[in-house]
């Protein structure tokens, strides 16, 4: 196949959000970064590390029910080797998974619990990673707009989770240049990039090629075929 085009998407509202986050970050006690458990490397935003500095961070591998459990565990082990990082796998359909996040926030900032001073937590993540659904489950009410396309949240909002925690919601953000070509295609395939920014056939080809190599038996079961063909287009 010919070389695929690079996929990039960094609209103006994301740049505005980055500047706003930079301003309020010094006031935060911790950061919650939501990443996609199916593509942890590609959905981990390098701007988060740059913006949070040494503040503790909870890395939530969201949509874990859709991911390879062995790889998810390997990624959690890897992430937790980093300073100030707590990693958990999460299925937003399971409220107990989500509620653990509140307990971890209090564990990471124990000096504010029960003092009347609220823990200020900023939640960040790429577009369409399930951040708004997670927030609604945390809050126990519909406070964040949800949708099946990227960039539904366009501005910051404050959400009181309980007497101890105030959550700062931020718009879904990518970064100015996705250096790794594979990451651009993985983000497109999992819904992190608006579909006007890429060619459907290219992304479908990339995704089929990967799945045929990585999970051939699952593909055969899912589509009820006995043998996989040689190429992605034959598979289609």
Image (cartoon, rainbow, N blue to C red):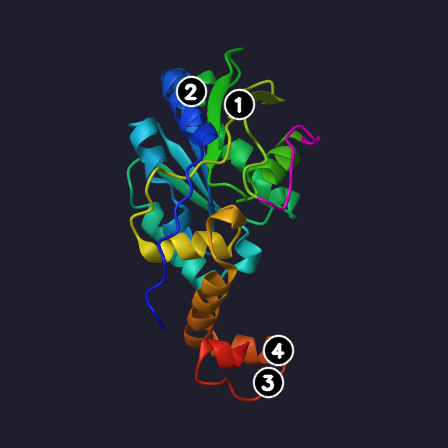
- Towards the viewer: 180 or 12: 12
Q: Which image quadrant is residue 175 in?
A: top left
Name which of mark 1 and mark 3 comes first in the sequence.
1
Q: Do the residues labelled 3 and 4 touch (CB within 8 Å)?
A: yes
Name which of mark 4 and mark 2 comes first in the sequence.
2
Compute the Cα span from label 1 to label 3. 47 Å
Compute the Cα span from label 4 to label 2. 46 Å
Return the mark for residue 156.
1
Compute the Cα span from label 2 to label 1. 9 Å
47 shown above or below 221: above
Could you tell me residue 80's position as x and y percent?
A: 34, 45
- In the picture of the structure, the residue carrying the numbered disc 4 is 223
Q: Do the residues labelled 2 and 3 touch (CB within 8 Å)?
A: no
Q: In what element is the residue under mark 2?
A: helix
Name which of mark 4 and mark 1 comes first in the sequence.
1
Per the rendered image, the range of residues in magenta is 140-149
């Amino acid at each position: 196949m010919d070389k695929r085009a690079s996929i990039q998407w960094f609209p103006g509202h994301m740049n505005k959000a980055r500047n706003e986050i930079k301003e309020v970050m010094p006031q935060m006690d911790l950061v919650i970064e939501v990443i996609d458990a199916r593509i942890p490397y590609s959905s981990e935003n390098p701007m988060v590390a740059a913006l949070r500095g040494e503040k503790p961070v909870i890395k939530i591998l969201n949509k874990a029910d859709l991911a390879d459990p062995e790889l998810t565990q390997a990624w959690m082990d890897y992430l937790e080797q980093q300073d100030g990082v707590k990693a958990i796998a999460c299925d937003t359909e399971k409220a107990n998974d989500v509620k653990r996040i509140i307990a971890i926030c209090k564990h990471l900032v124990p000096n504010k619990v029960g003092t009347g001073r609220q823990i200020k937590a900023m939640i960040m993540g790429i577009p369409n990673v399930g951040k708004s659904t997670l927030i609604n489950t945390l809050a126990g009410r519909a406070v964040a707009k949800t949708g099946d396309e990227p960039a539904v949240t366009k501005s910051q909002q404050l959400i009181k989770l309980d007497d101890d925690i105030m959550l700062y919601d931020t718009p879904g953000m990518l970064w100015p240049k996705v250096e790794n070509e594979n990451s651009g295609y993985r983000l497109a395939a999992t819904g992190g990039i608006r579909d006007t920014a890429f060619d459907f056939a290219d992304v479908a080809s990339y995704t089929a090629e990967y799945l045929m190599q990585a999970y051939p038996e699952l593909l055969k079961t899912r589509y009820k075929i006995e043998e996989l063909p040689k190429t992605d287009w034959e598979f289609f």
